[in-house]
Image: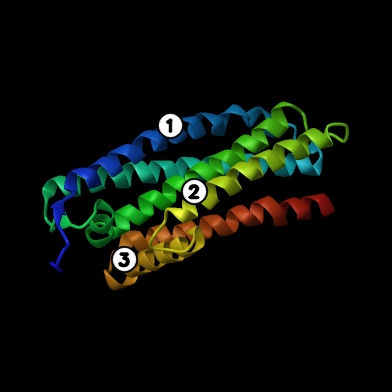
Amino acid sequence: AAAGVVLKDFSGAAAGYFGGVRIPASLIAGSSLGALFSLKGLLENMETKSPTERLVIQIYHAMVLISFILSLSTIVVATAATVTIMHGSFDVMAETAYILLQRELEFEFVSSRWAFLMSLVTFLVGVTGRVLLEFNLLTEKRRSLALGVVFSMTALVSHLFSYINSTLYCWPNFLMMTFHLIKLLIMRSFYEQRPLQLVAVVSACLGTFFSIKGLFYDTRKKKAE
């Protein structure tokens, strides 16, 4: 170690991080799963709704589904990471717990943190859509209230991202963290030759493509017909 640098065993703090992130992720997972089926009655008479209402309903269901997937991923990865720490097959000595996580459990640390933050954001987008639908704010008379809700939630999400960017430390912003996670996924898929990881990456890309296609292209096609 360099002069003046004190190395300590931060395995307990690392395990505490993964244990801590599972709690809010579990709350989001439970809430998003319930929200996913709570408005399914609105899908029965989609033809009678305005294009804006149909779009908001589709975005709502897409966002809460994504939120559930990401929060569940956070729970599973964090749990597995805790088991890895308990196994103790790596050097637990480091200057800080953050350095230990970045050095020894980089994929688990980055993926669980990214997935949790994105599950939170997508859940908030879903909540916004739910408010607009439940309180019938998508009408011409209530447009001002709808804009008030949208801008209020935009302010919240922007504030959260602004603060999150200041605590990333290894990256200048959340976007660069996302690129780094993509790099880690590519390395695990191809260089480390993990076939199921490759299946997950390809399936995620296809899921994103068809979801966007269903939300926008198919909706416009039906409207044109």
Q: Nearer the viewer, mark 2 or mark 3?
A: 2
Up-down relation of residue 40 to residue 158 (above or below): above
Q: Which amino acid type is marked by label 1?
A: Leu
Q: Which mark is residue 118?
A: 2
Q: Position of residue 86 (x, y in %)?
A: 14, 45
Tag 3 secondary structure: helix
9 or 117, nearer to the observer? 9
- Looking at marks 1 and 3 on the same chain, the residue that comes earlier in the sequence is marked by 1
Tag 1 secondary structure: helix
Q: Residue at x 65, y 37 (%)?
A: 128
Q: Nearer the viewer, mark 1 or mark 3?
A: 1
Outermost right residue: 141
Mark 3 lies on residue: 188
Q: Which mark is residue 27?
A: 1
Q: Which amino acid type is marked by label 3?
A: Arg
Up-down relation of residue 217 to residue 31 (above or below): below
| Dot 1 alpha-carbon crowd within 10 angstroms: few under 14, some 14 to 19, many 20 or more | few
- Looking at marks 2 and 3 on the same chain, the residue that comes earlier in the sequence is marked by 2
Tell me the quadrant of the picture where the N terminus can be found.
Answer: bottom left
186 or 107, nearer to the observer? 107
Q: Which mark is residue 94?
A: none
Q: Position of residue 160 (x, y in %)?
A: 53, 46
